[in-house]
Structure formats: C-alpha cells, structure tokens
Image: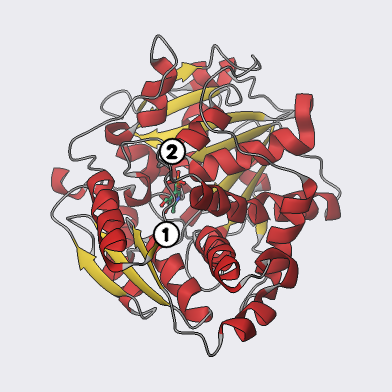
Amino acid sequence: MHRRPARWTANDLLGKKDLSPMPGFPLDDGIIEDVIRYHSGLPGYRTTPLLPLRRLASSLGLGGIWVKDESKRFGLNAFKGLGGSYAIARLLGRSLGIEAGKIGYERLKEAAQGVKPHTFVTATDGNHGRGVAWAARTLGQKAVVFMPKGSSRSRIDAIAGEGAEVFVTDVNYDDTVRVAAAYSAENGCSVVQDQAWEGYEEVPTWIMYGYLTIMEEITGQLKESGEGMPTHVLLQAGVGSFAGSMVAYLDHTMGQDMPKVVLMEPEKAACLYESAKSEDGCMVNVTGSLETIMAGLSCGEPNPIAWGVTRSKAAAFVSCDDEVAALGMRVLGNPLGDDPRIVSGESGAVGAGLLKLMAKEGSLSGLGGRLGLDPSSRVLMISTEGDTDPDRYRKIVWEGAWPLERR
Ligand SMILES: Cc1ncc(COP(=O)(O)O)c(C=O)c1O
C-alpha cells in the first residue's frame, strides 16, 4: 500500500440518545411482515445466499465471517430492486386505494390492469435505476431514469434493457437527482428516489423499508444454521439509505445487544464520515466530481433520515480509498480452501477489503483493535452487487487496475 488506505473516526455519540431534529424512521414488526409478504410474491423471489467464509475468518484471526450475496437478487445483480419495488407498490397501491403490503404483488398487479400506466422517475448511478425500471415493468408501469455524467455503457444498457427510457446528464449524481425531480414535476410523474429532502420523506422511507428484507432473511438464515447474530456488521454507504435501514432493523430487533456497525464510504464521497466528524454533529455535504470506482456509493449528500438513524448507532465511520474496494473484490473472488467464491463488484466488496486491513497485522489494525475484533468476533458483510460493470470488474481483478486512470 503506497499510502494510508482509509481514514476513520470512532463515533462519540454511540449509544447516546439522538437529539437531532432529523425526520424519524418508524419501525415495527408489522412493517417488516408487510415488506417480506410483498417481496416474496414477486416473480423470481428467493432468499439470497448467506455464505460463511470459515477459512478466511481463521486466517484473519476472527471467529466467523458471513457474506450475504445480493448479486442473486431477482436476477438484477444487486440488492436495489428491493427498495424500488416496495416503494412503487405503495405508490401504486395508494393511487388504486389498496394497501399493497397487505394484499401482495399478484393482487396489486391485477388491480393495476386496465388502468392507464403511470410513469415513475428516478436518478441513479446504476443499481437503483435498474431496480425501479424492473419493478415498474413487473407491474405494467413505465419508468424514466436519469444517470450522471460518466455513467458506464453496461449500466445504461442494463436499465434500458428493463424497458426504461434513460437520459444521461452532464452533472454529478446529486445534481442529477434534482434534474429527475424537476422532470417528474413538469410531466406529472412520481419520483422514486432513494434520497430524502424536505417535503420528500415518505417514498425514501418506503425504499428503506424495502431493504429490511435483507436483514430479516439474514436473521432467519443464521437461526436456521444454529449461528448467533453477528458481533460486527460492515455496511457500505452512498446516501446511507441502505445502511440506515440495516441499522434500524438491528436496533429494533436487538436493542442493547446490537452489533458494532461500521459505515464505509469512498473517500471523495464520504459525506457521512464528514458529518460524523463535524463539530456540531450536523450533516455535511461533499461536492465536486465524487469520482470513485465505487459507482453506487458516489453520493455527496446524506439522506437525512438515514443520518438520523445512524449518527448515534454506528460505532465508526470510515472513508476508504478505491484500493480498499479493489482489494475486497480480489479477496472475495479468490477464496481460501473450500470457502465459496463470491463475485462482488466495486460497491459490494469494500467491507472485505477493510476487514482484511483491520485484522491482525493489517495497516488498519488500530481500528480493528478499537472495534474489539478478535477470535470471538462474528463479522457480517453484505455484498450489495455483483459485476455490474463486467469490463471494469475484470480490469480490477485481472490487471490490478484501480482507479483505471492511475495505470
Ligand atoms: C451496490 C450498491 N451498494 C450500496 C449502495 C449504497 O446505498 P445507499 O445510497 O442507500 O447508501 C448502492 C447505492 O446505489 C449500491 O448501488
């Protein structure tokens, strides 16, 4: 490693009562049941694999490592369809006077037939837009998707392949969100954005509810295999909606016993890390090109709902160089002994890279020590995408290229 691969800050507010004025994220068992009911009725639903990496755990001096492989979600190569599908169901259900979470996918689809299709609009780095396009199509609806400048051809094609109209802007992700919202308002469509702002909180809350399926499945899978819940959970963040949802679930179901949560972001888009470091604990936006190989995490403005959830519940915030993600991709793609191979993309693998660096003699073992990583630790990671940009995946894994322009 030619320079410090990551910077971190431990959370001084951990465990303290959150006094922030941020909007809340109400959660109860009924919501979790509704979300699972809706998702399990969708075409192609099956529980994604939770893979134990026993050999890697013992080589890193840990008690256990589990990776939830979300590349297997609905054939979309990423987890994001969970959020978009649940939010679109709630929006469509409301317009039809139906409670989508209660009646499920088949009956919602039936009710939507014969009614003029509605258009759902979103901005995306790739995965969320593909999920929205897919979810709209499964219900016979339309989607318009905006992508930031520099979006890769394979990600654009994947969204268009789900039947959406795709526009690439000449601005970064956060500004593209504003472009999409303006288009939607002008054309009488509905915005399905995984980011909240003042007056737009309901849909992003539903999207975060949609992600709960992941942690509910994990809880069931660990129970079934006779394993306890993890002691540490590593979560990657763009705007933080995914991490916020996972943290809220753990807090709701485990309370005082909840695991230590580490939030990871790319260094040029580390808005939650910067927010955690800010003197007054207020949210900080990061601006500029936000350039990183972790395309799904390239967001400079935190979701205020997610920040409200994570600011007093995450143990540490970490700003990672691209090489941490590249390392994680190689670690997961080249398993030890009979550990399973996991094809994990740039935004999915950063946890595996960080874990390697935090373990025993790694260059971030100070952070590992602070988090109490030791032979009794059971670490959970969620590989949120597969090789969503296959050319880049191969360049990184075969040629050691990260970011590509350095080579
Ligand atoms: C693969 C992947 N992982 C993680 C995330 C982060 O999600 P969030 O923006 O909710 O923090 C994204 C967001 O698009 C993603 O595409």
Question: For mark 1, does the 10 Å Cα neighbourhood hold few (<14), some (14 to 19), or many (20 or more) residues?
Answer: many
Question: Identity of the amino acid at label 1?
Answer: His
For image coordinates 41% across by 55% down, the residue present is 345
Separation of marks 1 and 2 at Cα, in angstroms:
15 Å
**In this orientation, which residue lies closer to the viewer: 354 or 292?**
292
Question: Relative to 166, does residue 294 appear above or below in the rendering?
Answer: above
Q: Position of residue 331 (x, y in %)?
A: 47, 47
Q: Position of residue 214 (x, y in %)?
A: 64, 54
Q: Which residue is mark 2?
A: 303
Question: Relative to 294, does residue 397 appear above or below in the rendering?
Answer: below
**In this orientation, which residue lies closer to the viewer: 229 or 166?**
166
For image coordinates 31% across by 35% down, the residue present is 269
Question: Relative to 385, does residue 137 appear above or below in the rendering?
Answer: below
Q: Quadrant of residue 16?
A: top right
Q: Is mark 2 within 8 Å of ligand 1?
A: yes
Visible in this render: residue 64? no
Q: Which residue is mark 1?
A: 128
Question: Identity of the amino acid at label 2?
Answer: Asn
Visible in this render: residue 262? yes
Q: Quadrant of residue 161?
A: bottom left
Q: Position of residue 223 (x, y in %)?
A: 84, 50
Name of the residue lying farthest toward the bottom:
114
**In this orientation, which residue lies closer to the viewer: 88 or 117?**
117
Q: Is residue 4 left or right of residue 209?
A: left
Q: Secondary structure at mark 1?
A: helix
Q: Is mark 1 within 8 Å of ligand 1?
A: yes
For image coordinates 61% across by 42% down, the residue present is 246
Question: For mark 2, does the 10 Å Cα neighbourhood hold few (<14), some (14 to 19), or many (20 or more) residues?
Answer: many
* Quarter of the image with the N terminus in it: top left
Which mark is drawn over residue 218?
A: none
Question: Relative to 286, does residue 188 appear above or below in the rendering?
Answer: below
